[in-house]
Image (cartoon, rainbow, N blue to C red):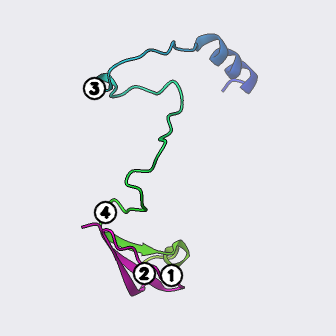
Amino acid sequence: MIPISKAIEIIKRETFLLKAETIDLSNSSGRVLAEEVCADMDLPPFNRSQMDGFAVRAKDTKNAPARLKIVGESSAGNGWQGELRKGEAVRIMTG
């Protein structure tokens, strides 16, 4: 083991900043962005689940397995409007 101060000295001496470059998206696999990229709009323009499944409260599944009552359904384009209470879940179907 080496002291932290020595490790920091080695890191500072042995590392360097890479220059940014512009490349085609098709050549970007395995690369790292030089700056943050933010979308200027949501797409799709509504909340959406990636997969079919269930919406649950994290507290209710902390000590999983857990039994939850399915109280509603959210399908593509028709979100569930209720309030999810303790011990409840909502079925999500992406279409």
Residue nearer the viewer, 43 or 1:
43
| Residue position for label 2 | 89
- The magenta segment is 67-95
Under circle 3, the secondary element is helix
Mark nearer the N terminus (3 vs 1):
3
| Residue position for label 4 | 51
- Please give the name of the residue rendered at 72% of the width and 19% of the height, measured from the top-left corner: 6
Distance (Cα) linking label 1 and label 4: 19 Å
Distance (Cα) linking label 4 and label 2: 15 Å
Mark nearer the N terminus (3 vs 2):
3
Asked if the residue at tag 4 contacts the one at tag 1, i.e. Cβ–Cβ closer than 8 Å, the answer is no
Left or right of residue 87, residue 23 in this image: left
Residue nearer the viewer, 58 or 62:
58
Under circle 4, the secondary element is loop
Asked if the residue at tag 1 contacts the one at tag 3, i.e. Cβ–Cβ closer than 8 Å, the answer is no
Q: Which amino acid, by three-letter code, is at mark 3?
A: Ser
Q: Which amino acid, by three-letter code, is at mark 4?
A: Met
Vertical relation: 69 (above or below) 23: below
Vertical relation: 69 (above or below) 2: below
